[in-house]
Image (spheres, rainbow, N blue to C red):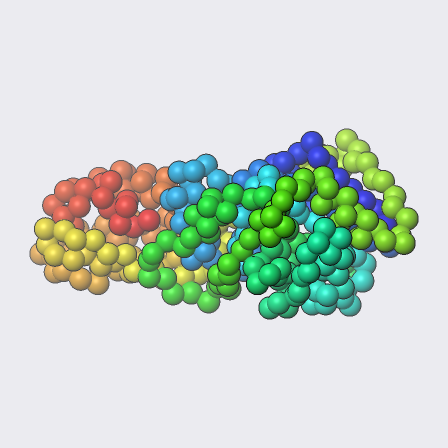
């Protein structure tokens, strides 16, 4: 088994790019084990709608990036108190067999005094609390199985980051299952370091299997940087890939309640419809709705479109900033 670590990097952009590089470009006939720790980040599943999973305004305000991973499953929060492990295997027949990949984690937890169980097919629970989520992705005869392990994460920040915004959304996206989580330290009622847990994890994953080190070449890093830039720093992948959805947005104006129906697909606004309040100047209202068609569903792009259109206060009873708040 190849064991790769990059303790110098806590960048989620870099670490997810390394994980993908190992999956797609290190084509060996033995498993690859990859450990990493990320700075604060929200990572959503491949088929999720980011706008249903988190409050984008809140994570932007806190400076927390949102990345989309290759595998499915629900949204997770990573920080420096969370261990991430990946096992890349040529054994694609193990797809959906989470027990085979989580057993070393169970054994490692037992070594530190905790008894774990697998629930909901891919989640690890201890004392009724979720401490680990796992997901898989298969491609070209290779299987990526990866997971998280909460050691000493900021659970207040976690809950805040994964709190969906209260809005009306209709879509067919895969939604996260909200579950009560806990840190290993809290369950143990004593201090335990990340390094100590890592020792147990490595021992169990590498049990009776000789470990082979792996170094990245300068050419490897060029490929990784390209993956990082093209995918994990791409708005089109992280946000725009969200499945199409319809959202209903409401605001109180001098005309009464204003209700907009906004259809979004591939990250761009397709149509905007006014569902309430009759205006005398329907032509102006239609022109306003049309000015948003094709605009990326992103506050900066929407603000530019509104500014270019030249919103008048008396159009819908709202100014430019108020309209931006209504639309996004």
Q: Where is residue 250 in the image (x, y as percent from the top left)?
A: 24, 56
* For residue 295, side relative to residue 279 (left or right): right
At horizontal 75% and vertical 39% (from top left) the residue drawn is 5
Q: In this view, does 254 lie above or below 60?
A: below
Q: In this view, does 20 lie above or below 215?
A: below
Q: In this view, does 225 lie above or below 207?
A: above
At horizontal 60% and vertical 55% (from top left) the residue drawn is 131
The quarter of the displayed image where residue 190 is located: top right
Spot the residue most to the front. Answer: 189
At horizontal 67% and vertical 61% (from top left) the residue drawn is 116
The quarter of the displayed image where residue 311 is located: top left
* For residue 319, side relative to residue 101 (left or right): left
Q: Position of residue 238 (x, y in %)?
A: 52, 48
Q: In this view, does 245 lie above or below 317?
A: below
Q: Where is residue 221 in the image (x, y as percent from the top left)?
A: 73, 34
* For residue 86, side relative to residue 321 (left or right): right
* For residue 190, side relative to residue 105 (left or right): left
């Amino acid at each position: 088994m190849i064991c790769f670590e990059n303790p110098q990097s806590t960048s989620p952009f870099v670490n997810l790019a390394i994980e993908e590089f190992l999956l797609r470009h290190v084509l060996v006939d033995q498993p690859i084990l990859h450990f990493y720790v990320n700075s604060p980040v929200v990572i959503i599943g491949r088929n999720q709608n980011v706008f249903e999973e988190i409050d984008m305004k809140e994570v932007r305000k806190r400076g927390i990036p949102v990345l989309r991973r290759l595998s499915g499953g629900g949204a997770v929060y990573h920080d420096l108190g969370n261990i991430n492990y990946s096992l890349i295997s040529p054994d694609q027949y193990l797809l959906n067999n989470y027990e085979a990949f989580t057993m070393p984690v169970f054994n490692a937890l037992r070594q530190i005094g905790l008894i774990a169980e697998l629930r909901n097919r891919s989640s690890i629970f201890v004392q009724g609390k979720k401490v680990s989520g796992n997901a898989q992705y298969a491609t070209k005869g290779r299987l990526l199985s990866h997971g998280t392990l909460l050691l000493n994460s900021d659970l207040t920040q976690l809950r805040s980051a994964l709190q969906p915004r209260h809005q009306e959304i209709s879509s067919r996206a895969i939604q996260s299952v909200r579950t009560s989580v806990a840190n290993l330290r809290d369950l143990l009622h004593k201090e335990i370091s990340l390094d100590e847990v890592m020792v147990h994890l490595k021992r169990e994953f590498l049990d009776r299997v000789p470990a082979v080190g792996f170094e990245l070449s300068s050419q490897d890093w060029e490929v990784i940087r390209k993956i990082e830039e093209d995918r994990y720093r791409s708005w089109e992948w992280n946000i725009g890939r969200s499945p199409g959805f319809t959202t209903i947005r409401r605001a109180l104006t001098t005309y009464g309640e204003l209700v907009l129906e906004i259809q979004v697909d591939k990250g761009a606004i397709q149509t905007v419809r006014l569902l309430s309040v009759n205006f005398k100047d329907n032509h102006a209202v239609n022109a306003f709705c049309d000015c948003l068609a094709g605009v990326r569903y992103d506050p900066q792009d929407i603000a530019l479109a509104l500014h270019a259109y030249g919103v008048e206060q008396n159009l819908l009873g709202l100014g430019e900033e108020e309209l931006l708040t209504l639309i996004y």
